[in-house]
Image: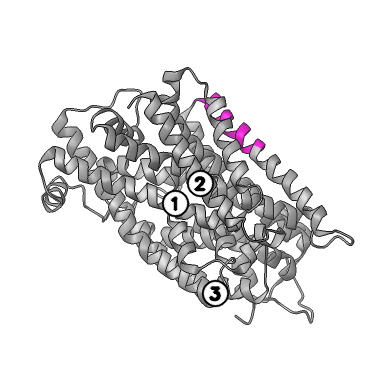
Amino acid sequence: MTPHVILISFLVYTALLFTISRLTLRRKVNNESYFLGNRNSPWYVVAYGMIGATLSGVTFMSVPGLVHSEQFSYMMLVFGYIGGYAVIAGILLPLYYKLRLTSIYTYLEQRFGFSSYKTGSFYFIISRLIGSSFRMFLVVIVLQRFVFDGWGIPLSVTVSLFMLLILLYTFRGGIRTIVWTDTLQTTFMVGAVILSVVLISRQLGAGVGELIAEASSRGYTNMFVWDFNEPRFFLKQFLAGMFITIVMTGLDQDMMQKNLSCRNLRDAQKNVLSFGAILIPINLLFLFLGSVLWIYATEAGIVLGPDQTSDELFPTIALQHLGIAAGLAFFFGLVSAAYSSADGTLTALTTVFCIDFLGLRRKPGMTEKRIEKIRYRVHVMFAFVMLLIIIGYDTINDEALISQLFTIAGYTYGPLLGMYFVGLYTRWQLRDRFVPIVAILSPALSYLLSRNSEFLFNGYQFGFEILIVNGLITVIGLYFLKKKPGKVDLPGYDH
């Protein structure tokens, strides 16, 4: 692929995004449009678009690369998602719609108090800033190495360009625009995988059935890890998948903001359940791509260099071995992943900061025009913060440390899990001002347990289920903050 082809492809894709953005702004746009899309988004559009938002660049590159070492064990995590989406549809969405929330963390204020409310919002902001910036970094760094380095363009300029474009097409429309641009990004990400499989099968002269049989004979399709001490033990993976879905979708403003933009509760529930079902074949497709990539690499004698990770298998084959069609497919898919890693997050961060921290909807005399001006400034501020974090990841230049930062971001969802569990399933009233202390201690203790688990628990290694432990420690901590209940309304208790 020549630089000119890449540049034209990037401009065409970006033009499509801006065209969709402009179409979403044809009707009157206001703050309600930005925050909740005027609660008028078609559920099937939201469901389809959320596929790309959920997959992100990590799935696009990392999942296919992991097949060689972890086979299809990732699917046990995906099967667990279904249980998580059932909880979201049956418990969390009815709560959010009943209380007509814009920021889902407002529930914590109504249930426990001001400190709990701010703690929940703060942990979301930290989690999303670290996590989404890392996801975008993973994607942009591949584009940088395979494309922009050849043009002599530094990473800071590449990232700045992406953030500027994301800022421009989400600036006014917010969630109304994101719902529709997500559909384009999903189409290109999934299309890139399908086209890559087709092109590789032609190169190998084998049909899909033959490739499945070959992948099975090489052990790539194994889903079950039976060793209880292993982090990928199938039951751990299943339970972790369920709780990851509950916290990283059901307790995440970015994902829930799209659901809350649906016309009513029933549509939002249809969106979540259908979206959860679609994720099973989609993730199987990514894993199958991984097996096909490794088969092709073996047959073609492709060996990753000592400074390359399995994440680079897909770009190496697509951009250097399969011709222009595969290169373009990969490029479009990767650019889609880069955009999807940040656009919804930027809108959600702006929403939470404006609603939860600045309290714009509560301040007397705050006009819609004034709210809009402040919202614009906050939107730009978070774009700049994400830019600095992404550039900071490159400065660290230590893959192990960066991965730990991403893992630590996942720990911050544990306190949210514990707080919502206590809010929904107990009548406890808490000494609210001490809740932040518990929220700080629980992920710290969970991290220490995880780091020393082999010594403490006879060789046991924590995987993603550390999230459940984190939530449990939070619940125990909140138990010690109980106070005698008074006659107060407990929102959501009668769900």
* C-alpha gap between disc 3 and disc 1: 30 Å
- Residue at which label 3 appears: 91
Compared across the picture, whether 461 is left or right of 485 comes to left
- Residue at which label 1 appears: 184
Q: Mark 3 or mark 1, which is nearer to you?
A: 1
**Quarter of the rendering occupied by the C terminus:** bottom right
Q: Earlier in the sequence, mark 3 or mark 1?
A: 3
Q: Which residues are magenta?
A: 384-397
Residue drawn at 54 percent across, 74 percent down: 91
- Residue at which label 2 appears: 17
Q: Does the CB distance between marks 1 and 2 fall below 8 Å?
A: yes
> From this viewpoint, is residue 367 visible?
yes
**Quarter of the rendering occupied by the N terminus:** top left
Q: Does the CB distance between marks 2 and 3 fall below 8 Å?
A: no
Quarter holding residue 238:
bottom left
Q: Mark 2 or mark 3, which is nearer to you?
A: 2
Mark linked to residue 362: none
Question: Considering the numbered disc 1 on the image, is that residue within a helix, a strand or a loop?
Answer: helix
Compared across the picture, whether 382 is left or right of 225 comes to right
Residue 109: image x %, image y %?
A: 74, 65
* C-alpha gap between disc 1 and disc 2: 8 Å
> From this viewpoint, is residue 460 visible?
no
Residue drawn at 67 percent across, 72 percent down: 100
Residue 121: image x %, image y %?
A: 68, 55
Question: Considering the numbered disc 3 on the image, is that residue within a helix, a strand or a loop?
Answer: helix
The amino acid type found where label 3 is placed reads Ile
Residue 361 against residue 331 in the figure, above or below? below
**Crowdedness of circle 1 by 10 Å Cα count: few (<14), some, many (20+)?**
some
Residue drawn at 51 percent across, 56 percent down: 180
Residue 319 against residue 92 in the figure, above or below? above
